[in-house]
Image (cartoon, helix red, strand yellow):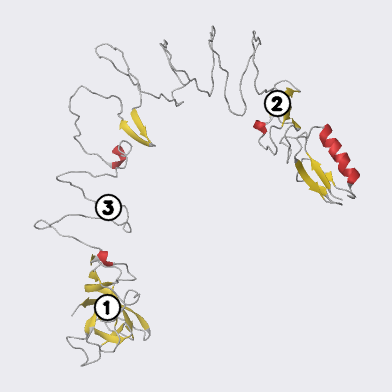
Amino acid sequence: MAYTIVKSDGTVLTTIADGTINTSSTSLGLPGRNYAGYGQSLDTNFVHVTENFASSTPPAQSLRGQIWYDTSTTTLKVCPTDGETNALAWLSLTSTASGGNTTFGSVNITGNATANNFTATNDVTANNFTAGYLTISANATIADASITTANIGTLQTTAITTGSATTPGTLTGVWSVTGNTGANASAILLDTGGIFINNSGNLYGIRTDKYMYANGDPISFAGTYSNSNVAAYLPTYGGNILTTQTQATVLTTGANTTAGTITGNWALSTGSRLSATYADLAERFSADDVYTPGTVVELGGEHEVTAVKYELSEDVFGVVSDNMAFLMNNGAGSNDTHPAVAMTGRVRVKTLGTVRKGQRLVSAGEGHARAAEEGEATAFNVIGRALEDKTTTDFGTVEAIVTIK
């Protein structure tokens, strides 16, 4: 019959079926009745118990009260709770070599405690030594720790240091500084560097090459400044910059694919102009399908525009563009729902057959254009005129000058 294993506190640990061995409930192998390797399992268990599971890591499936010899610290330790895997949480009992640790849950000392070197610490919570009254008559070194107190009436010293000019330190609270350096009143003197305020990782403050003046005299910014000599002093600002006049040779969002916004009613002064890299003026119209650039469209369909259907159609309206110099009605939708239709200018047109530069383009149906034969072109069916030759007879594209009729 199966073995039922009960812990010291009366709770059932596990049940072991006949002919099996349990290695998941404790750090030992617990054989069931008629297990073939019974003797080897017992011998192995005796060895592990004898050496107190000597290893650099805690034994697996440990039980509360189990003893473990930590070879990394040469310390004997006791498991505080079932299944504890954190070595620092195990209680240290004794040291087998110089430099080991001994820990206790709580120890009260009513008399004197004397030692050549005395250390009080808690490996788990890092709570340190507490004393009601402490006198240090010699030097005291506190490394990588905090001193917390309700009040220090007066701290009298000539130097407070982190150890070096490059080692950071922290001063928290609202502090008042009183001092006198010659002709100056209360002051903080900085040999090098500047003053910064760290607000959630953002640095705000004052940085100068050598000096900072606060006597009310205006600061002159005369001269020419480049990004190289001000970038280190001015962070990127994401708010509004208010000015009545801004003079610059470049206004950019950072890349030609990064969108920007201009708000307000703007006018170009006499002699001023806007220039663009691309050459057509386009407007977005709602379409009944997704149309790729170069598609010839006409008014109609379920929405505003659809691909031109018939050859020599007089309903041709324009050509879908993707490299427009100026785009109107841009907020109407995306390229899928509201393609940009070239109103006028240069645009590539899907074309069937050969084309000579200068030939007029008319509808070939199915969203394509073709070169007009003699006598076919009218004021109503011409899409535009080709600006280049096309020597192939299959489908392709031709750059053309187009306009809406």
Q: Position of residue 303 (x, y in %)?
A: 28, 77
Name the residue: 53% across, 12% down: 132
Q: Position of residue 207 (x, y in %)?
A: 31, 30
Instruction: Indicate the secondary structure of the residue bearing disc 3.
Output: loop
Q: Position of residue 200 (x, y in %)?
A: 38, 36
| Sooner in the amino-acid sequence: mark 2 or mark 1 | 2
Residue count near mark 1 (Cα–Cα under 10 Å), binned few <14, some 14–19, many ≥20: many
Res. 131 visible in picture = yes
Q: Is residue 3 above or below residue 388?
A: above
Look at mark 1 in the image and give the residue it sits on. Answer: 305
Mark whose residue sits in front, 2 or 1: 2
Q: Are marks 3 and 2 in contact (CB under 8 Å)?
A: no
Instruction: Indicate the secondary structure of the residue bearing disc 1.
Output: strand
Q: What's under tag 1, amino acid-wise?
A: Val
| Outermost front residue | 10
Q: What's under tag 2, amino acid-wise?
A: Ser
Q: Is residue 126 above or below residue 114?
A: below
Name the residue: 28% across, 89% down: 311
Q: Are marks 3 and 1 in contact (CB under 8 Å)?
A: no
Instruction: Indicate the secondary structure of the residue bearing disc 2.
Output: strand
| Outermost top residue | 137
Q: What's under tag 3, amino acid-wise?
A: Thr
Tell me the CA gap for discs 3 and 2: 65 Å
Q: In this view, does 222 lie above or below 360?
A: above
Look at mark 2 in the image and give the residue it sits on. Answer: 92
Q: Quadrant of residue 261?
A: bottom left
Tell me the CA gap for discs 3 and 1: 34 Å
| Sooner in the amino-acid sequence: mark 3 or mark 2 | 2
Look at mark 3 in the image and give the residue it sits on. Answer: 252
Residue sitting nearer the eye, 29 or 2: 2
Q: Position of residue 276 (x, y in %)?
A: 23, 62
